[in-house]
Image: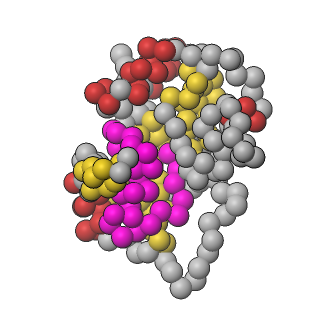
Amino acid sequence: MYTLIYKPYGMLSQFSREGDKPTLADLPFAFPKDVYPVGRLDADSEGLLLLTSDKTLNHRLLNPKFQHMRTYYVQVEGDLTEEACRRLSEGVTISVDGKSYHTLPARARRMAEPPLPPRDPPIRYRAAIPTSWLSITLHEGKNRQVRKMTAAVGFPTLRLVRWAIENFTAEGMQPGDVRELSKPEMITGLKLA
């Protein structure tokens, strides 16, 4: 089984309960017991998440040597500069598991506010503090990496949406939407052929 979901803000990227947070089991879809998310989005992030029962695909997407691309739309606090985008593109030093880690080169650019579904609850609006939008494409996935990267260049993340996984995008999806895919669609969308 191959499924794309638009994980809502506040939901855990797992089926098992942990406190009172909603989980993937709360989505209006009957997932088979052997389906698992490939990768994660923390509860404070939203957007595309791939679920599958295909262990070979799962291994390929989680193994760093295969480097699949993921694009995030990020709302940051402040007026994002070209210098910050350049630094993000070249890689920045963040902390991973208590150790210093220099991120791999990425594609980072400032962008106009994207047409995303409203977030529930919305981002707190503060008239005196501007916000900016950034598109960043990575082919690695350390824990909370994008948030750590934007903080490292002085622009804390306010909203984080995984917009694309390789050729798949969240275009036309709303939080909680589930889209089943065929194996050929998955192979083409993830550029595995």
Residue at position x 59%, y 79% in the image? 126
- Residue 70 location, x and y as percent? 41, 40
Q: Residue furthest left?
A: 90
| Left/right of residue 114 with respect to residue 107 in the rendered view | right
Quarter of the image for the C terminus: give it.
Answer: top left
- Residue 120 location, x and y as percent? 70, 57
Point out the stretch of residues depicted in magenta.
137-162
- The picture quadrant where one finds residue 35 is top right
Position of residue 121 relative to residue 9, above or below, is below
Residue at position x 72%, y 45% in the image? 19
| Left/right of residue 90 with respect to residue 32 in the rendered view | left
149 drawn magenta: yes
- Residue 62 location, x and y as percent? 41, 28
Q: Nearer the viewer, residue 164 or 39?
A: 39
| Left/right of residue 87 with respect to residue 128 in the rendered view | left
- The picture quadrant where one finds residue 176 is top right
4 drawn magenta: no
Residue at position x 47%, y 40% in the image? 164
Position of residue 193 relative to residue 12, above or below, is above
- The picture quadrant where one finds residue 182 is top right
